[in-house]
Amino acid sequence: MTDIEWARNVDGSRGKTWNPVVGCSIKSPGCIHCYAMRLAWRLIAMGQARYRGTVKKVKGQVVWTGKMVQAPEETIFEPLRRKKPTTYFVNSMSDLFHEDLPDDWIDLVFAVMALSPQHTYQVLTKRSARMRAYFQRPDLYRRVLFFADNSLRAWRPELRGIGIDDPARSPLKNVWLGVSTERQQEANERIPDLLATPAAVRFISAEPLLGRIDLRQIIREGINGAFVDNALDGFVSNGCGGSYGPKLDWVIVGGESGKDARPMHPDWARALRDQCTAAGVAFFFKQWGAWAPVGWVHAASTGALLRPDGHVCRDRSQLAPSGNYEMARLGKARAGRLLDGTTYGEMPRRAA
Ligand code: SF4
């Protein structure tokens, strides 16, 4: 079972993580304090051999080595043995579309997901360009079928009765695709790729949220210059007007937790909530993380003076004219997940 608040089964019980691959490398500022990296180090110390070589220590800090390891068959095939409908967060210890992952490994993951329609899979990536390119491969369907027939149906003949549609033409109904967007820059880079990728449910995870994001103003570079799209209603501009296409179905927001966590300005979270509410898009506030605003949550002392641009001020002379917040370091459990006194836990509609 997983503690990840948004990986929940239909009945609200806790879902699971599924790691057909482990190992990764830093991609963008949201990765700097990667939880999986530190966990991998601890798992090695606990004797989990499959993590060996994926991390090392440099000047006392744990870092990824970039080595990727495919899980043993019993792990890869685990969802096929499980009958109870379960929500799986895929690759919590890696990135399924990491540039060094062979296509074959991704094909096998999609074959497993296609042959277990009783489950829901949440796939979150920071490598949106590779995800988009993967779905544009002309031989995608043939390759997924190859693994389904030769690796999986040969092992469990009862899986032969489950049909598989071409994932590029008819998205797998049980697979949700998402991208991490910690700042506007990453939102601009990754959301256009996500919206151009076929998916039953498209979501973003703005965690750790490191800056203000406007999802109605996604700036996309095109051959004829930059265009501004609205990811919440699907409006895509083309320079002389535009048209409506796919939009986001779900937005997750969270602050950073852990020893070196960076505080999240309350107005960044509020802005995303308000944008989603106005557009009718499901909004999930996962956590404050290590820091919470003083006054909202009981806090004995202040720890950081935070400007609206995210700068942590050493003294009051650095504060902005308005919009500053005093943040207290409480730890994830005490900081909780109330935003303006409300718990936001909306989920997207599951495909029928
Ligand atoms: S992509 Fe995910 S797993 Fe990989 S380094 Fe970044 S946060 Fe960690």
Image (spheres, grey):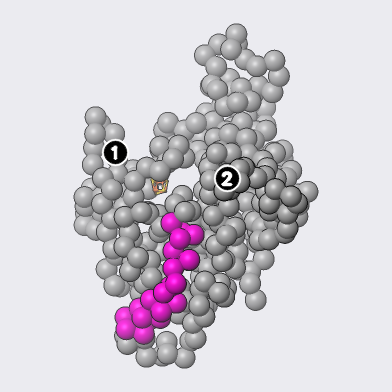
Q: Looking at the picture, which amino acid does disc 1 mark?
A: Val
The residue that disc 1 covers is 62
**Where is residue 338, by image quadrant?**
top right
In the image, 42 versus 180, the foreground residue is: 180
Identified at 40% across, 43% down, the residue is 27
Whether the magenta-drawn stretch holds residue 102 is answered as no
> Visible in this render: residue 75?
no
The answer to whether residue 153 is above or below residue 203 is: below
Nearest-to-viewer mark from 2 and 1: 2
Residue occupying the point 66% across, 57% down: 247
337 sits to left or right of 20: right
Q: Which residue is mark 2?
A: 221
Q: Are marks 2 and 1 in contact (CB under 8 Å)?
A: no
| Secondary structure under the numbered disc 2 in the rendered image | strand
Q: Please tell me how crowded label 2 is: few (under 14), some (14-19), or many (20+) other residues with Cα within 10 Å.
A: few
Please name the residue shown 29% across and 44% down the image: 64
Residue 231 visible to an observer of this rendering: yes
Q: Which residues are magenta?
A: 130-151
What is the CA distance from the residue labelled 2 to the residue labelled 1? 36 Å
Q: Main secondary structure of the magenta part?
A: helix
Total marks placed: 2
Q: Which one is in front, 3 or 203?
A: 203
- State left or right for residue 166 relative to residue 298: left
Secondary element at tag 1: strand
- Report the amino acid beneath label 2: Glu
Ligand 1 under 8 Å from disc 1 Cβ: no
Residue 234: image location, x then y, percent? 69, 56
Residue drawn 65% across and 21% down? Answer: 324
> Please, is residue 82 above or below residue 34 in the view?
below
The spot of residue 232 in percent (x, y) is: 70, 52
Q: Quadrant of residue 263?
A: top right
